[in-house]
Image: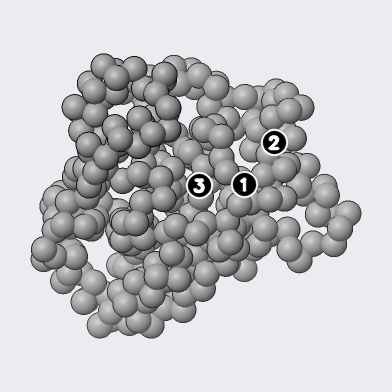
Amino acid sequence: MYRVPSFIHIYGKKAITNPNLKEISSYLKSLLPKTIIDVRTDLISNFLEPLDSSKKDEAVDSLAEKLAGIRVLDYSKQKLNPEPMYAEIDYERRKILNPDTKSIGVFYDGFELQNIFYSIIGKDERSFSHIHVVFTNQLIATWEDDDSRYHARSSVYGFPSIISTAGIVEAPAKPREFYLMKQQYGMMGMDDLAIAEFKRKFEGRFIDYNDPHMTEVCKGYAAQALFFHITGEPFCEDKGCRLFNAHWQEELIYSQLESPYEFCKAHTDMLKKIIRNGLTQT
Ligand SMILES: [Zn+2]
């Protein structure tokens, strides 16, 4: 049984300029023509907007404290930041009020962030007829029991799904030579020009901040969020399918930019079936 949504809400307008969220919205519309799709401001602003000023202040304080509390302070410890410092809470408060502020490399626990986001989605939109896709420029990480540490993530699927543009740059591994050369060059001591020169050597082999291909790549992540919602499985084994779970930048570039097809045969057929059956509510 497929859970086909009647509505998809994309969050990040104003705060996110790359990817182009309107293009992502049109892309999803091309996959599910009968679904109504809107692009909203970032999820927190969307939640705060209708509140009156005293309630809003209260909500900002409470959210700031919660967000500061889910920072990953140490990759090797599952414990987060249960007693955040004032400066950390204040940083979150300022970021809530100015969502387009550049992030400063703080990682948040992706599933905890999902819980906080879930709590501020309107109750009438917490059902399978709605998909919520949150784009953020913040970094997320999830704990892996296998090696007992946090790993950076480009996305976390669920309710809502979160796609991190910084995570797309940082999570899938860059070519091995990149790390070797970075070590050799001693990047820490390089000036901006030298860093640009260094990155140019790897042009086209990884997605960088403000990359012109960011929108195209994000279409694939948005499609994964869609498939997660509809079928429970966001990923595909086929390296040329938009749903391929890339662990390397070069795999990401192949599946999202270079592959001769959008989706593998199985997922193309699945989409046709979903569209043909129309909207089936659960
Ligand atoms: Zn596939």
What residue is shown at x 52% (from left), y 57% (from top)?
Answer: 16
Q: Nearer the viewer, residue 198 or 116?
A: 198
Q: Position of residue 136 (x, y in %)?
A: 51, 50
The mark nearer the N terminus, 3 or 1, is: 1
Residue beneath disc 2:
91
Q: Quadrant of the C terminus?
A: bottom left
Question: Vertical placement of 217 versus 31: above or below?
Answer: above
Q: Is residue 90 left or right of residue 257?
A: right
Marks 3 and 1 close (CB-CB < 8 Å): no
Q: Quadrant of the N terminus?
A: bottom left
Residue beneath disc 3:
137
What residue is shown at x 67% (from left), y 58% (from top)?
Answer: 45
What residue is shown at x 21% (from left), y 76% (from top)?
Answer: 272
Q: Position of residue 40 (x, y in %)?
A: 57, 67
Q: Position of residue 241 (x, y in %)?
A: 17, 57
Q: CA distance from mark 1 to mark 2?
A: 10 Å
Q: Amino acid at mark 3?
A: Asn
Ligand 1 contact, mark 1 (Cβ < 8 Å)? no
Rate crowding at label 1 as few (under 14), some (14 to 19) or many (20 or more) other CA atoms within 10 Å.
Answer: few
Q: CA distance from mark 3 to mark 1?
A: 9 Å
